[in-house]
Amino acid sequence: MCPECKKREKIGKIIGYVVDIALAAAVFYAAVYLLRKGSIHYRPESQWPLGILTGLPLVLRPRKRATAPELLIHDVLVLLSASSFALLLTEYVVKGGILIGNVQIWQGYVYHAAIFGIVYWIVCNIRLTVCIGMGITMVYALIDHYVTVFRGTPVLLSDLFAVGTAKNVAASYSVPVELSVLQTVAIAALLCAAVWRVRRPASAPRRWQFAACSLLMGCWLYGLGLAGNSFGFWQGNLEYSEWYYFCRTAENAVVKKPAGYSETVLEQAAQAYAGRSGAVQPNIIMIMNESFADLKSIGDFETNEDYMPFIHSLAEAENTISGDLLVSTFGGGTATTEFEVLTGDTMAFLPFGCSPYQMYVKSETPGLVSGLEAQGYQTVSLHPYLATSWNRQQVYERLGFDRQLYETDFSDDAARLRGYISDSADYRKIIELYEAKPAGEPLFVFNVTMQNHGGYGPSDDPAFEERIRLTGAYEGKYPQVDQYLSLVRYSDEAVEQLVAYFSQVDEPTAIIFFGDHQPNVTSAFYDDLFGNTEAARTREEKQAKLTTPFFIWANYDIEERAGVQISANYLSAYALDALGCAVSGYDQLRLAAREQVPCINNYGYYLAGGAWRDSSGAAAEPALSLYQHVQYAQLFDPKRRIDAWYEPLA
């Protein structure tokens, strides 16, 4: 070799060593940075082992003439290092490195390690394994991060069935390019580059790699047992690592047949609860108002004026029932509340985090809508947004709606707020439907509004006026809350006008109004109202974020009630009974269950005396056992179920 070539080779080696040292130093710095974030910093029992694992493969590099066992050992060290970084990066970008305990940290670590192990078993190349594994980690972590930012809850398996809906609503949000996101991606790329730069004389024979993979899989399965499989569905993702939380909710996505389930049980239910004919057949207008909630149900705060004076006044109004509705979702998941109300089913008997519209309503499903249609009602669904959201077109058809109306059925000049059709314009469409129907033909409208949908960033819409502002201790502190409460004020006015209109019509008419979930406004505002953070809240406190207002109003005589506490699964049965309408056997069964269990959702339930129980015990609750059997039949056993029993009597 010529002297010049030798010189260039020497310089190249020196530069390579400098680059390797720089990469190693950067990786060490990144590891220390991540390990000092959130609660991991205060868990030395986990912090030190994770820190050591992140750097070992960059220190213990294979020799130039390394044997196959040495290469395999180094592969394992790289896998352990990459798993550590995957865990730390995911927890950092999603929730700032907050993990409650050491057990939860290692549960997450083992799950991340399994991902890299599976990739290694497939590709049998440590460099590709790290790059592919970190790519999978980054895709999941960033999706989870932004879903949490927009919705307030982490990504779940059911979200994979709602990709179309997510695409529809994504335009409503601005995606911030945050420093934490850039840091996370940079550190992941840095690790991949550092591993790629590790000089390997060769790879171990594939038979050795497969043997190592088998051993690793055995170790990881054993590690799962050591890490434990404790999991409380009522708890949030702050109590668990993100990937562990996703996997544990995903593995419960299959609905199992209740113990003792049989056709005989269904027949006994039909005999015990036969349904009842009605004394009146009113027009029924059911409005599920997007993100409509009274935030003072959580804690007190001051505003420049009442943000829902009409709703508040209904506590003393004639022919009105009002109170609080317990739902199963926060900040999103509109179709979950919709499902519970229209079917009468409860999310307590379904996997936590599932999306029934996408996963379970796969054929004709008897219930409220099909029963009203059989009574001669004109049944119309109305949603002033895209038809593709939540698989509604197919689901509404299976539930029995005659007509479906969406955003394209509104005029181009329909009033909008922040780009969404306003509640006022929405309700005018309801009036049009009423005025266009044949006289004497009853009308059922199920309306899902859109005006109050998140997010609540600054708006340049000239039609939107920020009429409500926080005052006192929170003045100027939470602009998102100011915008949200102003939207609620618009909603309050719109429903007041709708009630005023139907109070003047001759035909008996009822309005059932409720919010689908609370808004995902600034989490710090919720922390202020609660006086603590999400991680510190008890289960009962967390339920406060799952309540919305409801009222039932009629333009004819019904018994007034205020302060009613009810959950979404009971609402339609309760409303039909209170309005003097026909009810189904399924309605009667739920009303009987409500006497013992007045409120239930996917987190748990309350007994009549006020005691709280976790949803894991719902199947064993005597008042709920038969309920679970007939709900299973309605959703999963069309051959055995008695369709007419689920429908209000014709």
Image (cartoon, helix red, strand yellow):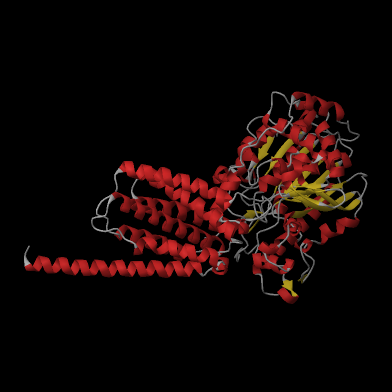
Viewer-nearest residue: 108 or 479? 108
Picture quarter with the C terminus: top right
In the rendered structure, the answer to whether residue 447 lies left or right of residue 35 reads: right
Question: Residue 202 appears at what percent x and percent y?
Answer: 25, 51
Question: Residue 39 appears at what percent x and percent y?
Answer: 58, 66
Look at the picture and state if 375 lies above or below 174.
Answer: above
Viewer-nearest residue: 260 or 333? 260
Q: Is residue 257 visible?
A: yes
In the rendered structure, the answer to whether residue 292 lies left or right of residue 107 reads: right
Residue for point 31% across, 42% down: 206
Look at the picture and state if 211 lies above or below 296.
Answer: above
Viewer-nearest residue: 24 or 571? 24
Q: Can residue 500 be seen in this view?
A: no
Question: Residue 326 appears at what percent x and percent y?
Answer: 77, 51
Residue 490 occupies which quadrant of the picture? bottom right
Residue 60 occupies which quadrant of the picture? bottom left
